[in-house]
Amino acid sequence: MDKLPTEVEIGGFKIEINKDFRQGIQFENMIKEYDLQDEKDAIKFYEEAIKLYYGNIPNEIKSEAVEKMMWFYRCGKDINTEEVESTQKEKIIDYNYDANKIYAAFRDQYRINFQKDKYMHWWEFKALIEGFKEDNEINKVMSIRATDITQVPKEQKEYYTKLKRLAKIPLPTEEVEEDMEMSNILMNGGEIPKE
């Protein structure tokens, strides 16, 4: 494996980029906060994102800085239009909502304690998530979220539809209701109530 990048080249200069996974998570949170279809919001978003990844940089290199920032965020991968379309359909992981499950998986599988191990490169973080074992709770939840109901056998559609509803990443106002519903299910032996 090549050495993980710690800087990017912008305008002919090597510029250090904030590479810790926390910046990647914060960047994703910022994406949710801004309406990127609105020009003013998009400009504010990119200004904040540039500060997050680089600190202060000259205006004349900001456009290239955004390109390099996005390249870094995508872990050096080119934009794949199929991936963009699938992520627009339904997210299968939310670093805030799923934080406890992610933390537990890192502790269980990799013996990584984010309370003690303060730094991890964004690319390493993403690679380790992709490598989660099937029996980790977060992997089970991501698998349910990724299930395409149209490809499920007819007799299992109702079951998987309910599972997906329970596992979906809620909008902020839905979180409390979803937690209560999941608690009720767990307290009743794991039975999904019939509607």
Image (cartoon, rainbow, N blue to C red):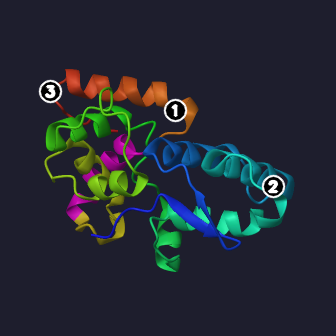
Give the Cα distance between marks 1 and 2.
Answer: 30 Å
Neighbours of disc 3 within 10 Å: few (<14), some (14-19), many (20+): few
Tell which circle, 1 or 2, labels the residue nearer the N-terminal end.
Answer: 2
Amino acid type shown at disc 2? Ile
- Lateral position of residue 77 relative to residue 65, left or right: left
Nearest the viewer among 9 and 158 is 9
Mark 2 or 3: in front is 2
**Secondary structure at numbered mark 2:** helix
- The answer to whether residue 100 is magenta is no
**Secondary structure at numbered mark 3:** loop
Residue 86, position as x, y percentages in the image: 47, 68
Mark 1 or 2: in front is 2
- Lateral position of residue 111 relative to residue 168, left or right: left
Q: Residue furthest front?
A: 13
> Residue visible at 67% across and 74% down?
12
Amino acid type shown at disc 1? Glu
Tell which circle, 3 or 1, labels the residue nearer the N-terminal end.
Answer: 1
> Residue visible at 63% across and 45% down?
52
| Residue span colored magenta | 155-169
According to the picture, the residue beneath numbered tag 1 turns out to be 174
Q: Name the main secondary structure of what is drawn in magenta.
A: helix
Neighbours of disc 1 within 10 Å: few (<14), some (14-19), many (20+): few
Give the Cα distance between marks 2 and 3.
Answer: 50 Å
According to the picture, the residue beneath numbered tag 3 turns out to be 189
Residue 183, position as x, y percentages in the image: 30, 23
State the quadrant of the N terminus: bottom left
Neighbours of disc 2 within 10 Å: few (<14), some (14-19), many (20+): few
According to the picture, the residue beneath numbered tag 2 turns out to be 43
